[in-house]
Amino acid sequence: MALIKLEKASKIYQQGEIEVPALKEVDLEFETGEFSTVFGPSGSGKTTLLNLIGALDKPTSGLVRFDGNNIVESDKNQLAMLRRNHIGFIFQSYNLIPVLTAYENVEFALKIARGSEGKKTKEKVMNILAKVGLDELEDRKPNELSGGQKQRVAIARALVKEPKLVLADEPTANLDSETATGVLETMLEMNRELETTFIFSTHDPMVMDYALRLIEIRDGRISKDERRD
Ligand SMILES: Nc1ncnc2c1ncn2[C@@H]1O[C@H](COP(=O)(O)OP(=O)(O)OP(=O)(O)O)[C@@H](O)[C@H]1O
């Protein structure tokens, strides 16, 4: 069974009187363990597609399934639970909790998804912070961190709960190439060891180089879908 399945999924935004068709009858499947990238021009529908895949939004018509769950028929609480337990989000607006430190932001995500695991919680949080290169900065609050450092807290927060799926919108946007490589290697390692599925949206050639599947979207339709070894 595919982890994610979209069947004729369409999304039309209503802007006052005007209808904006952002996705047009998209058929797409992702198997568990895929490492893929969605790319395409600005306004082509990448964020809209990621929002549907991540159960943040429902299609106007068509079907979206996540791990067998019908997203269209799920209520708000069911969707919130699914996102909390199974999906890690790395989006542009990092949505870090301003009053919590880097450590606490990551710990909070782990605790609400998995409950408290005592000593293991600390070990897991410190381990992932070290992997994204933030182990010296764990006591800083978001307003004491640079853009790229905040982005790395968001990455650590998404990865720490070892979700089935990680959705990342331009995950390397604010990172220098050395840090970006480190982050991508960490993700690839998780992909190999835990079969975590990754879906990126990016313009960054480096992220595209790492991807094993490249999906191009143009004007709300999938225009290319290629796998490589
Ligand atoms: N909330 C909204 N209301 C109305 N129109 C919207 C809304 N969100 C997106 N759109 C429109 O839907 C289309 C697809 O937008 P989307 O954000 O998915 O594109 P994108 O490929 O992610 O673009 P970018 O690379 O610039 O982030 C665009 O025409 C956009 O203007």
Image: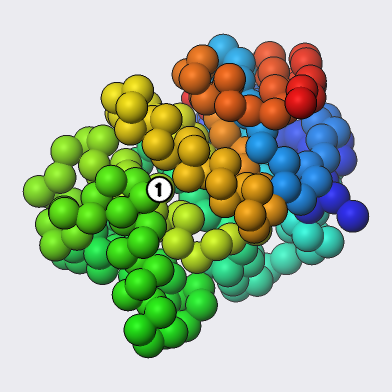
Give the amino acid at mark 1: Ile
In this view, 25 is above or below 195: above
Residue 54 appears in view? no
Q: Quadrant of the C terminus?
A: top right
Picture quadrant where residue 72 is located: bottom right
Q: Nearer the viewer, residue 5 or 52?
A: 5
Give the residue at x 57% y 34%.
200
Query: Where residue 203 sits: x, y (%)?
Result: 50, 18
Query: Where residue 207 sits: x, y (%)?
Result: 52, 25
In this view, 150 is above or below 67: above
Picture quadrant where residue 47 is located: top right
Q: Quadrant of the N terminus?
A: bottom right
**For the residue labelled by badge 1, is the local secondary structure a helix, a strand or a loop?**
helix
> In the rendered view, does 197 fall on the left or right side of 8?
left
Q: Nearer the viewer, residue 128 or 101?
A: 128
Q: Pick out the residue farthest to the left.
A: 144
Give the residue at x 78% y 60%.
67
Query: Where residue 147 sits: x, y (%)?
Result: 22, 36
Residue that mark 1 sits on = 155
Q: Pick out the residue farthest to the right.
A: 1
Q: How is the image coloured?
A: rainbow
> In the rendered view, does 219 fall on the left or right side of 88?
right
Give the residue at x 49% y 38%.
185
